[in-house]
Image: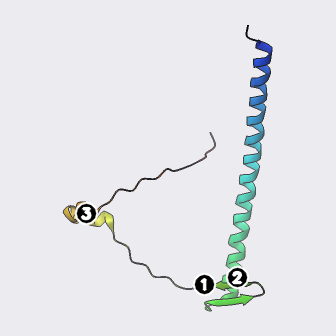
Amino acid sequence: MINIVFITKKIRNVILNVAKCHFCRTHTLKEIAELETEKKQIEQEVKLAMGEHELAVSGNYRVSWGNVDSTRLDTKRIKAERPEIYADYATVSHCRRFEVKAA
């Protein structure tokens, strides 16, 4: 015989645990956002202090801030203008994306 009272209590506990997890997650996400904002502000202050200098040393920290050049192919343009070349060199990569979003 199924004990309905036991199952009802079990479901209630699961719902309470989910609610606690949601609260903790929401609180943690808020803290992360605040820390990221603070990090950006600190980085901006350091950059302003560095001016045009590419290297700064202070206590336990060594900060470098320099230009970086990179060359990339315009794959959309190659695909549109030279689809045969795109087809010869295109590769497919596979990955799994993990996302958590509010419902």
Contact, mark 2 vs mark 3 (Cβ under 8 Å) = no
- What's the distance in space between the residues labelled 3 and 1, CA to CA? 36 Å
Q: Amino acid at mark 3?
A: Tyr
> What residue is drawn where x is 73% and y is 10%?
2
Near-viewer residue (23 or 48): 23
Mark 2 surroundings within 10 Å by alpha-carbon count, few (fewer than 14), some (14 through 19), many (20 or more): some
**In the rendered image, which residue does mark 1 sit on?**
65
In three-dimensional space, the C-alpha distance between marks 2 and 1, rounded to whole angstroms, equals: 10 Å
Q: Amino acid at mark 1?
A: Trp
Identify which residue is drawn at 77% across, 12% down. Answer: 3
- The dot on residue 46 is 2
- Residue 44 placement: quadrant: bottom right
Please identify, in this view, whether the residue under mark 2 or under mark 1 is nearer the observer: 1
Q: Earlier in the sequence, mark 2 or mark 3?
A: 2
Q: Residue at x 64, y 90 (%)?
A: 55
Q: Position of residue 43 (x, y in %)?
A: 68, 76
In the displayed structure, does residue 88 sit left or right of residue 70?
A: left
Residue 81 left/right relative to 26: left
Residue 29 image point, x, y percent: 71, 53
Of the residues shown, which amino acid type is indicated by label 2?
A: Val
The residue positioned farthest toward the top in the image shown = 1
Q: Which tag, 2 or 1, sits closer to the chain's start?
A: 2
Q: Residues within 10 Å of mark 3 (few under 14, many from 20)?
A: some
Up-down relation of residue 44 to residue 102 (above or below): below
The colouring scheme, among rainbow, by chain, secondary structure or one colour, is rainbow
* Residue 1, position as x, y percentages in the image: 73, 7
Along the horizontal axis of the image, is 88 left or right of 56? left
Q: Secondary structure at mark 3?
A: helix
The residue that label 3 is drawn on is 86
Tell me whether the residue at label 2 lies in contact with that at label 1, contact meaning CB atoms closer than 8 angstroms: yes
**Element carrying mark 1:** loop
Q: CA distance from mark 2 to mark 3?
A: 43 Å
